[in-house]
């Protein structure tokens, strides 16, 4: 409709007052003309008109109202709004003097309402995703002053994490983009996983109201999609020179066998003297070196479900989530598989399994790893102290508020937080113990509703997949370093420990060459140093008369018995020497005694000569000779190898092994290394009725022929030797596989 038509066609449109317009708009056709900036606009005037209530930012004094003339005839001769027409000759409303408008009581203004029509997702990753909140305003939008947003948890719907007025004028339909940010200081800048799910509300404030009115609520979740457990992180948090190589090895192995990894413990701990093979030194010194093992930094990354369904990282969105760190010892089936994988022979397996049953049901959780009474981590609740806990704080920012687990008291809690020094959400320093062969199963759980403090060992079977990490099976292994090798003679081949390690593997122990270790031929230098040693020790009459200054390819060398006799009997003439040879021919000489003396002197000569050659740092050094025997004058049985403790030369972490046997001499290397690792001889000899010097039946399995004997049928270490090399307190274990309870000793 053209405003000019209304203004010019007075026969069709009659000007009326505002009060008349308010009355007549319910009966006839009323229009309103508004003037602004020299322009006239016309609009219908009724109860839905924005000019009806006379509120808002409009200048209503400039409005003019018109009633369609034809409509007045319907009121039975009455004027507009039912006012009686004036008598003839009296002026009409348009002609009469303006009269004050009478007050009209209007219906109360109806404030429009706002409604959330939809959210574009059910869950999202805060500060990573953006939620689109669709809303609609019903009613006169011109009466709306502002739109408001509220966020609350569904658990506490009246406590608002965010309550804010949105920017911009209200619209009939709109979309607000929200990234999850909130203002509640108890949160970490945004809604998070630990308090999910949430209510989203939108409210509308009218121009005549004092506060916004909120209508429907829309649910929204922060949802966990995956809990990921890793060893180490990109920033090296928790790494030291001690565990750096271990962490790299764990990561490398876990790539090849996901979920399984080996904790390689530095196990180069050696005896200082032969007495230590019979006392508790093997246990106490190993424990002193390793305590409860090496701390391994374990980390958790929580992946949230993005609005597109993919996993997304939102460190602030998971902050405050509590993590339960859990470790379970090997059970019977696991131990059986563990021993089988290591190739333990049946006799030793039987012994080891029996000892592993010690107080199996008395610990929480139950298991068959080494009990704390014997040096392990498995403990009863009352006996668990800091030395029997697998967890230590890695960063104070992840320290959990509140107590440790009560029911699952062997576990530990941390909280997720955003740290500038880590790519992960939370972490701990984990200790798997020091006992070689022990295996523990480590899992991290997102304790979203604080209900995982449960003593049930089968927690992993109860918790849903997103809330638990993959389980990491960590098995301890003891590594003894092979740090240096010396060869006497260009044709002397190096020692290869592959075959020997097949036996040590049963103890979860390996002798491993250090990186870059290559044996060197020292033959010429050995002869030179040996000559100097002979000269130095020539004050000893036997060495002066019997020792040769050139040992050849032997560790030591001596003249023949007859040469020695003649040299030590210069007073005997020609016939005396002939008579001595005749007696020797008939076995009436002292040659056997001479050979024993050669053996004793040989030990002195080659052990003193060896001191001129430095031992490798932290590990085993071997000397390999081409010829059989430690000297050239043996008669029958010869010394094939030796693992001596040489004062001023060998140390607690530097041992030496001499091999005087051709080839790889596996059956010599294994027991001699056993001596270095504190193992004494076991009963049994190739000569009936004899036993090796210093053999001790109490520290070997009574039902097995042990490798530490001289018995011709020996093939393996006994079960007690395997446990002893693994770090168990063998002094508490009897040779029938029963265990001495510490309470029995009190």
Image: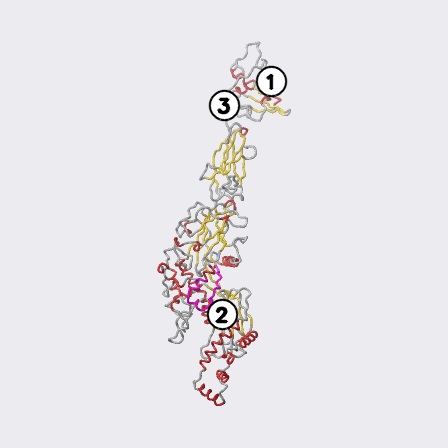
Residue 270 horizontal/vertical position (percent)? 47, 66
Pick the front one: 150 or 599: 599
Residue 314 spot, x, y in % from top left: 52, 46
Q: Is residue 675 above or below residue 324?
A: below
- Sequence-wise first label, 2 or 3: 3
| Dots 2, 3 in contact, CB < 8 A | no
Q: Quadrant of the C terminus?
A: bottom left
User: Outermost residue, right direction?
Assistant: 38
N-term-proximal mark, 3 vs 1: 1
Within 10 Å of disc 3 (Cα), the crowding (few <14, some 14-19, many 20+) is: few
What number is the disc on residue 56? none
Q: What residue is pinned by disc 1?
A: 10
Residue 168 appears left or right of 715? right
Question: Secondary structure under badge 2?
Answer: loop
Q: CA distance from mark 2 to mark 1?
A: 131 Å
| Mark 1 crowd level (few <14, some 14–19, many ≥20, 10 Å Cα) | few
**Pointer 2: residues within 10 angstroms few (<14), some, or many (20+)?**
some
| Residue identifier under label 2 | 646
Q: Is residue 13 left or right of residue 399?
A: right
Q: Position of residue 45 (x, y in %)?
A: 55, 23
Q: Which residues are magenta?
A: 262-285
Real-space Cα separation, disc 2 to disc 3, in angstroms: 111 Å
Q: Is residue 594 above or below residue 299?
A: below
Q: Nearer the viewer, residue 525 or 298?
A: 525
Q: Tell which circle, 2 or 1, labels the residue nearer the N-terminal end.
A: 1
């Amino acid at each position: 409709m053209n405003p000019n038509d209304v203004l010019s066609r007075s026969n069709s449109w009659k000007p009326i007052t505002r009060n008349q317009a308010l009355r007549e708009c319910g009966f006839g056709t009323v229009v309103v003309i508004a003037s602004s900036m020299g322009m006239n606009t016309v609009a219908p005037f009724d109860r839905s008109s924005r000019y009806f209530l006379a509120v808002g930012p409009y200048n209503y004094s400039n409005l003019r109202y018109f009633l369609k003339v034809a409509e007045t005839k319907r009121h039975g001769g009455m004027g507009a709004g039912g006012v009686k027409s004036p008598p003839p000759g009296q002026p009409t409303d348009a002609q009469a003097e303006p009269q004050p408008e009478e007050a009209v009581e209007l219906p109360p203004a109806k404030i429009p309402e706002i409604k959330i029509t939809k959210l574009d997702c059910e869950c999202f990753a805060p500060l990573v995703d953006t939620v689109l909140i669709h809303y609609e305003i019903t009613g006169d939008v011109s009466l709306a002053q502002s739109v408001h947003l509220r966020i609350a948890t569904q658990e506490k719907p009246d406590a608002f994490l965010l309550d804010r007025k949105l920017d911009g004028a209200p619209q009939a339909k709109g979309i607000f983009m929200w990234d999850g940010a909130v203002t509640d200081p108890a949160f970490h800048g945004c809604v998070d996983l630990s308090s999910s799910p949430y209510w989203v509300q939108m409210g509308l404030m009218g121009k005549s109201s004092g506060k916004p009115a909120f209508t429907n609520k829309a649910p929204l979740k922060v949802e966990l999609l995956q809990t990921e457990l890793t060893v180490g992180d990109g920033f090296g948090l928790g790494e030291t020179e001690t565990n750096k190589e271990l962490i790299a090895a764990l990561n490398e192995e876990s790539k090849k066998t996901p979920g399984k990894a080996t904790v390689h413990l530095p196990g180069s701990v050696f005896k200082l003297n032969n007495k230590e093979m019979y006392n508790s030194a093997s246990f106490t010194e190993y424990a002193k070196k390793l305590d409860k093992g090496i701390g391994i930094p374990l980390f958790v990354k929580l992946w949230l479900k993005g609005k597109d369904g993919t996993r997304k990282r939102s460190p602030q969105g998971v902050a405050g989530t509590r993590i339960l760190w859990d470790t379970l010892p090997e059970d019977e089936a696991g131990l059986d598989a563990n021993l089988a994988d290591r190739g333990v022979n049946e006799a030793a397996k039987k012994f080891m399994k029996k000892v592993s049953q010690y107080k199996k049901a008395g610990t929480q959780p139950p298991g068959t790893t080494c009990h704390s009474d014997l040096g392990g981590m498995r403990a009863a609740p009352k006996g668990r102290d800091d030395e029997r806990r697998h967890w230590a704080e890695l960063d104070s920012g992840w320290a959990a508020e509140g107590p440790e687990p009560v029911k699952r008291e062997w576990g530990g809690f941390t909280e997720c937080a955003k740290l500038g020094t880590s790519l992960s959400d939370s972490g701990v320093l984990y200790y798997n113990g020091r006992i070689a062969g022990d295996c523990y199963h480590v899992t991290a759980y997102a304790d979203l509703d604080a209900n995982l403090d449960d003593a049930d060992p089968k927690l992993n079977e109860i918790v849903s997949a997103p809330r638990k990490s993959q389980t990491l099976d960590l098995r301890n292994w003891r590594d003894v370093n092979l740090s240096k090798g010396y060869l006497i003679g260009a044709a002397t081949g190096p020692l290869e420990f592959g075959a020997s390690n097949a036996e040590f593997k049963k103890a979860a122990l390996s002798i491993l060459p250090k990186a870059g270790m290559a044996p060197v031929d020292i033959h010429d230098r050995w002869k030179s140093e040996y000559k100097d040693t002979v000269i130095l020790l020539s004050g000893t009459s036997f060495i002066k008369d019997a020792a040769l200054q050139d040992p050849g390819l032997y560790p030591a060398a001596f003249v023949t018995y007859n040469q020695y006799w003649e040299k030590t009997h210069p007073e005997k003439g020609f016939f005396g020497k002939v008579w001595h040879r005749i007696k020797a021919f008939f076995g009436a000489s002292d040659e056997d005694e001479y050979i024993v003396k050669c053996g004793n002197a040989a030990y002195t000569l080659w052990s003193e000569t060896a001191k001129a050659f430095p031992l490798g740092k932290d590990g085993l050094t071997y000397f390999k000779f081409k010829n059989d025997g430690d000297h050239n004058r043996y008669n029958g049985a010869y010394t094939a190898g030796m693992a001596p403790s040489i004062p001023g030369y060998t140390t607690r972490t530097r041992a030496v092994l001499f091999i005087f046997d051709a080839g790889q001499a596996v059956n010599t290397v294994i027991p001699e290394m056993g001596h270095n690792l504190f193992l004494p001889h076991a009963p049994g000899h190739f000569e009936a009725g004899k036993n090796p010097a210093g053999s001790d039946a109490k520290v070997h399995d009574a039902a097995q022929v042990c490798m530490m004997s001289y018995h011709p049928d020996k093939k393996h270490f006994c079960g007690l030797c395997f446990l002893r090399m693994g770090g168990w307190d063998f002094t508490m274990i009897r040779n029938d596989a029963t265990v001495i309870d510490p309470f029995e000793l009190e």
